[in-house]
């Protein structure tokens, strides 16, 4: 079991909902980062390798404690779990985004907004890497007890502290906790769109596709301008050549007329009287 400052490091699944791309291309969403209730861990995960499974209870007093809630603001979002806990010395190496500060209670859950800024991670999400896992530390009091609804537990969590939220291929809870979950369309990833006119047609585009269209249109304008300049320059060259040809033709006509006149004079002078 990994520990930090003597506290066990635990990875817990979370769920993202309502994902969308912003005008700047970032991915924003809303995550259920933690909940109250009973959790089942392998004994090796919580420092009890002699036990096959350990039932851990997390009460409301732990989840919604002000100190706990404060640790879930500005959490680093990572692409996969880092090999070490995030701190001031290594965050630039692993961080691809962060959670916000607007924490809400949603029944038994904590709900927090997140933003993912790294383009590669966003593309990974779009390609199907869309499950989540939370990394945090806590104190475990291995005093057996019973939850308010009568379920037995082996340990109770105290002093929970969030460290990071990882985007992973597969989390422990399975595909039920993922980005864009829900076949009905609810919670699926959405993308901001708008309607623009392209070549006389009204089309629906994203900010990214609009930028691509604008870029192509700029290239078309540049090519058109280059061709027009080429045509203009070519026209000027043709005119110069045409003028030269006309000038030469004029010179030829003048010389031809002179030659013919000379021939008539010579013929006249050669006649006998």
Image (tube, rainbow, N blue to C red):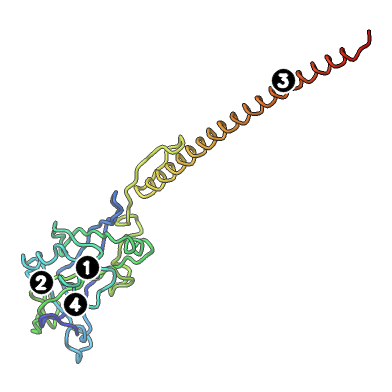
Q: Which mark is on residue 254?
A: 3
Dot placed on the residue nearer the N-terminal end, 1 or 2: 2
The picture places residue 9, in percent across and down from the top left corner, at 17, 78
Q: Which residue is mark 4?
A: 10
In which quadrant is the N terminus drawn? bottom left
Q: Which residue is mark 2?
A: 59
Q: Which residue is mark 1?
A: 92
Q: How many marks?
A: 4
Query: CA–CA distance between discs 3 and 2?
Result: 113 Å
Q: 36 or 82, which is in the foreground?
A: 82
* Labels 3 & 4 near each other (Cβ < 8 A): no
In this rendering, is residue 100 above or below 40? above
Query: CA–CA distance between discs 1 and 2?
Result: 34 Å
Dot placed on the residue nearer the N-terminal end, 1 or 3: 1
Looking at the rendering, which quadrant does residue 50 occupy? bottom left
Disc 4: CA contacts within 10 A as few (<14), some (14-19) or many (>=20): some
């Amino acid at each position: 079991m990994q520990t930090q400052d003597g506290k066990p490091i635990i990875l817990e699944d979370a769920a993202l909902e309502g994902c969308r791309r912003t005008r700047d291309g970032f991915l924003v969403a809303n995550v259920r980062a933690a909940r109250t209730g009973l959790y089942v861990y392998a004994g090796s995960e919580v420092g009890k390798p002699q036990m096959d499974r350990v039932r851990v209870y997390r009460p409301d007093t732990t989840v919604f404690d002000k100190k706990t809630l404060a640790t879930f603001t500005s959490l680093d979002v990572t692409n996969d779990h880092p090999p070490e806990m995030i701190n001031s010395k290594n965050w630039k190496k692993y961080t691809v985004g962060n959670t916000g500060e607007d924490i809400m209670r949603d029944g038994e859950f904590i709900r927090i907004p997140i933003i993912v800024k790294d383009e590669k991670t966003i593309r990974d999400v779009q390609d199907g890497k869309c499950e989540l896992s939370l990394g945090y530390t806590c104190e475990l009091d291995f005093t057996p007890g019973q939850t308010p609804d009568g379920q037995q537990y082996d340990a109770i969590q105290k002093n929970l502290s969030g460290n990071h939220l990882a985007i992973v291929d597969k989390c422990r809870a399975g595909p039920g906790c993922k980005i864009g979950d829900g076949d009905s369309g609810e919670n699926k990833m959405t993308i901001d769109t708008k309607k623009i006119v392209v070549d006389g047609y009204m089309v629906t585009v994203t900010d990214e596709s609009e930028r691509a269209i604008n870029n192509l249109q700029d290239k078309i304008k540049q090519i058109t301008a280059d061709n027009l300049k080429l045509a203009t320059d070519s026209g000027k060259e043709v005119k110069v050549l045409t003028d030269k040809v006309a000038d030469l033709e004029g010179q030829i006509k003048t010389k031809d007329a002179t030659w013919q006149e000379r021939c008539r004079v010579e013929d006249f002078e050669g006649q006998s009287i």
